Amino acid sequence: MTMEEGFMGRGLLSLVLTAVTGAALLAAPAAAAPAPPVGAAAPPGPSDVYRPVRGPAAPAEYRYLQKTLPGESLPRHAHDLAAAQARELPTVGGRWNAVGPTNIGGRIVSLALDPKRADTLYAAAASGGLWRSTDAGATFHSVWPGSWTQAMGAVATAPDGTLYVGTGEPNPGGGSITYEGTGLYRSRDGGRTWKPIGLRDSGAISAITVDPADPRRIYVAAAGSLYNGGGDRGVYRSEDGGATWERILAGANEFTGATEIVVDGDRLYAVLWDHRRTPELRTYGGVGSGVFRSTDDGATWQRLGGGLPPAGPDVGRIGLAVAGEKLYAIVNKASGPFEGFYASADGGGTWSRTPADDTLTNSQSSFGWWFGKVWIDPRDSEHVHVAGVPLMTTKDGGGTWTADDTSMHVDQHAMVWDPRRPGRVYLGNDGGVYRSDANGDGGWVKSRHQPYTQLYSAAISPQDVTRISGGAQDNGSLRSWGGERFNEYLGGDGEENLINPADVNNVFACYQYGNCFSSTDGGDTLTYFADRTTYQRRNWFTPVVFDPRDPKVLYYGAEVLNRSTDGGATWQPISPDLSGGPGPDPIYTNYGTITSIAPAGDGRTVYVGTDDGRVWVTRDLGATWTKLADGLPWVTRVVVDPKDPQRVWTTHSGYRSGSALPHVYGSTDGGRHWRNLSGNLPAAPVNDLVVARGGILYIGTDQGVFTSVTGGGHWLRLGRGMPQVPVDDIEYDAGHHRLVAATFGRGFYELTTY
């Protein structure tokens, strides 16, 4: 490190935001406030809502840039290799206890029914593992090893009841795509025990199909790594239950993967998709994208034309469904928007584009690659559902469409019909699992127990240990009070949450890009204040913190630091631009920002870190600033000892491609000199650090929570019982000896400390 000298009410919010979570909120026109729920008379939202990029690409971009070094891609198997390092460390402490939420849910990417057990359903959560319900989707419990990757892509069952899971989420958005999978797994006992069966280098697995006539014949659509070419990608077949594999369809280039594989009698259908993320560019389409058919069990393949878009650089993700001679395909452009919906009545030989329909077009917003799914009613081939922000339905083979985004959460990803229960359909989306007994035409009922929420943040209170809040991916800001269970009190993608340590009813919550609100009644009514801050750029996760001496004093980080002395009512900038300026990306203009703020206990000293690796300090409340570091990886946290303004730590993100760059630094002289405290930590991002009694350090990482009783350098795994899931935030309550962790895929966990 180098040194350098330098210088509104709950009613309003429920109307404006709460029902408009995730992509529905993001898909609104740039100048418009989030849309109100159907039937609500909503006043306009804040006039200056700052959301420069909309849709699931935004959190994916945030997480990708945070988890990589500038100019470098994500190394192959980075998460899994670091997890193996973590498992080698001794474990100390007690047991982590899951504390919810269980009623909110999270993104479900695949569903499968058990052919041997009625009302038994398997659900694959994007970064939360595999779950089983034995009561028709009402409640779920985990059937996946906690010590393995929790990143899921597909689940399928064979006619004999054998269960298959493909790891790694194939949808390149929402954040969890950062955590690639480790191949394919098999269970012969309903998920009690598992065996890896290959395709370790598949990155992400999109679909698994078992031949209904032969349970040992398995077909897999491997999407491949989004970040690294080659590996196991394309369509694979096993004739021996997964003991050996043969690739039967390869793509046009090293970034062409498979997203669908359908077995229909003696014919096979597959969808291939070019998709790649480099340090500078996102390309979600290409000449390798298309629908393919084989009439000789995969020996030869034909790319289908006959009315489908010809091969070219603008062909994006395609969703396909097959019912005998009847086929449907939804095609999106490489840039994301809808291209067309096509139908074939002759097994894919010829295709016709169905009539233009604005509702269907708009359902894909600008990110059709987030969906790419079509489902045909097994009893009526004219009755079809299509994944979009809403659930799209046609009852006349694509002639006319209706949209449903009011009876379930937005962003649809998975659907399965129950052959035992006519009319019963299960749906998976960004809000979890739903069931309809009306053929999917309404009547959706949400699962009441599904503990796999992706959390960005946590907030706790020493005044009331029952109060926990936090920001959730596509599920808003959640609180444990104000109802019988966790409930959403601010919509969008939940980000920073705070609870005043001296007043539990004074809370703060934000949605993406620093759109933040304050409340004096526990979140029942909320007042927007981000329009009172000074900013040109705000990060996807904008930091807001209390001053440790006086919670009426708060700090808010844009590219400049803002300070409030009246509880967030008014704000003043107290710094120049502390970043290196906006990044080069013309689309993602929200970088070059403050990512962490650490006010000291003396009332004068404040440290900040930025997303471009700078660390600064002011010792006179902003009159002058000193740069303490530059050119480091993304600063995830700056922490100052509340009793000693000279004692400070910084933590950093980024998987290193062989680099020994530290993830944790410490200083005892106010940042003039720094010591590498990474020691024996896994080579993985460190997301948070807290200082406990006696100088004990706790850190939250992509591979769990670790502790050091020596002040860093030598680290131990902390606690048992938490799955291998990223921990984005940790909060410490010294008076009650507890630590609360916000995980990205399994909700909140709590541990008693000593």
Image (tube, helix red, strand yellow):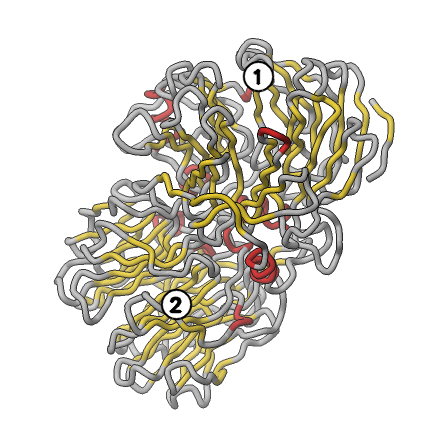
Disc 2 crowd, CA 10 A, few/some/many (<14, 14-19, 20+): many
Q: Which residue is mark 1?
A: 532
The nearer-to-camera label among 1 and 2 is 2
**Residue 655, percent across and down?**
66, 54
Quadrant housing residue 240: bottom left
Residue 730 position in % (x across, y down) = 52, 36
User: Residue at the location (18% across, 55% down)?
Assistant: 135
Q: Is residue 31 above or below residue 155?
A: above
Q: Are marks 1 and 2 in contact (CB under 8 Å)?
A: no
Q: Position of residue 484 (x, y in %)?
A: 25, 30
Question: Circle 2 is placed at which residue position?
Answer: 165
Question: Which amino acid, mark 1?
Answer: Arg
- The quadrant of the picture occupied by the N terminus is top right
* Vertical side of 599 occupied by 377: above or below: below
**For this view, does 648 lie left or right of residue 351?**
right
Tell me the residue at 14%/59% (across/down): 423
